[in-house]
Image: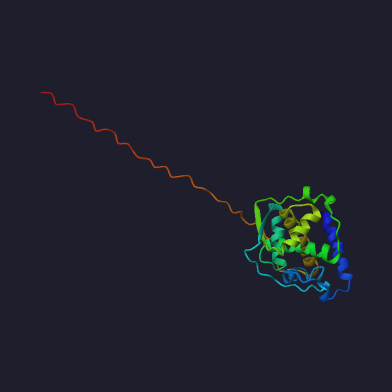
Amino acid sequence: VVVAISTLTRFVWKAIEMDQSKEAIPQGTMAKRLLLGLVAVLIATAGLALTSSSSGAVGETSVTTGYKTSGVSDLIWATEHLGYDSPADLQKAGVQVIHFILAGLSGMTADECALGLGSMIDPTGPYSYTSVWTADESVALDWVTDHYCITDSQAQSYGGTLLTFFAGLDAGKNGTSAVRRDPPATTTTTTAAPATTTTPTAAPATTAAPATT
């Protein structure tokens, strides 16, 4: 995972050195949200013109990714620092950033399955976040899963990890008002056992022996 992030970071720095015009950058459906997250980080000078999109029920895909307790605090902190509403938005934006950097800026076509991310990324844990993808947005998700030979859930985990890493770089340079907190309590559903009804059994009445004369 570290190697893959380092590769992406190099592409980002190359993008910064390029003289990109707004017209040269493709308009993404989540563009504005991505810019809010990355303008102060690494690719602001690429001139991304982002627009948010509304999602409809037709063609939507819901993907759930879980996170371990050891990393969820950083994920939630990065979500707050980058201005996203929830980790579900952060991990989705992360996938779109990966797609934009590799497919959009670098024009990469060869896959990187040899990195072995499929065996490294564990998208399970007590903290689960579900991202909803429209049919158009799923193009980025499908590209990333094919590029790294990973599942949809793993792609979101990698996207969340990437933006958490970028958020750390930005906070180190520019500071932050976001506070890193302890992991929140997990939500569990407890099924109560049915109440046990105890019916007391009264002792039978005792009949006194007849009086003797």
Q: Residue at x 79, y 62 (%)?
A: 99
Task: Give the side of residue 115 with respect to residue 69, left or right.
Answer: right
Q: Where is residue 171 in the image (x, y as percent from the top left)?
A: 77, 66
Work out which residue is located at the far front of the displayed protein and give it. 58
* Residue 164 falls in image quadrant: bottom right
Total marks in image: 0
Q: Nearer the viewer, residue 155 or 172?
A: 155
Task: Give the side of residue 55 with respect to residue 166, left or right.
Answer: left
Q: Nearer the viewer, residue 201 or 45?
A: 45
Q: In this view, does 69 lie above or below 14?
A: above
Q: In which quarter of the image is the C terminus?
A: top left
* Residue 75 falls in image quadrant: bottom right
Q: Position of residue 146 (x, y in %)?
A: 79, 55
Q: Which residue is drawn at 35% across and 40% down?
A: 199
Q: Where is residue 54 in the image (x, y as percent from the top left)?
A: 66, 69
Work out which residue is located at the far top of the displayed protein and give it. 213
Rendering colour mode: rainbow
Q: Where is residue 92 in the image (x, y as percent from the top left)?
A: 71, 62
Task: Give the side of residue 156 with respect to residue 109, left or right.
Answer: left
Q: Which of 142 and 200 is in front in this view?
A: 142
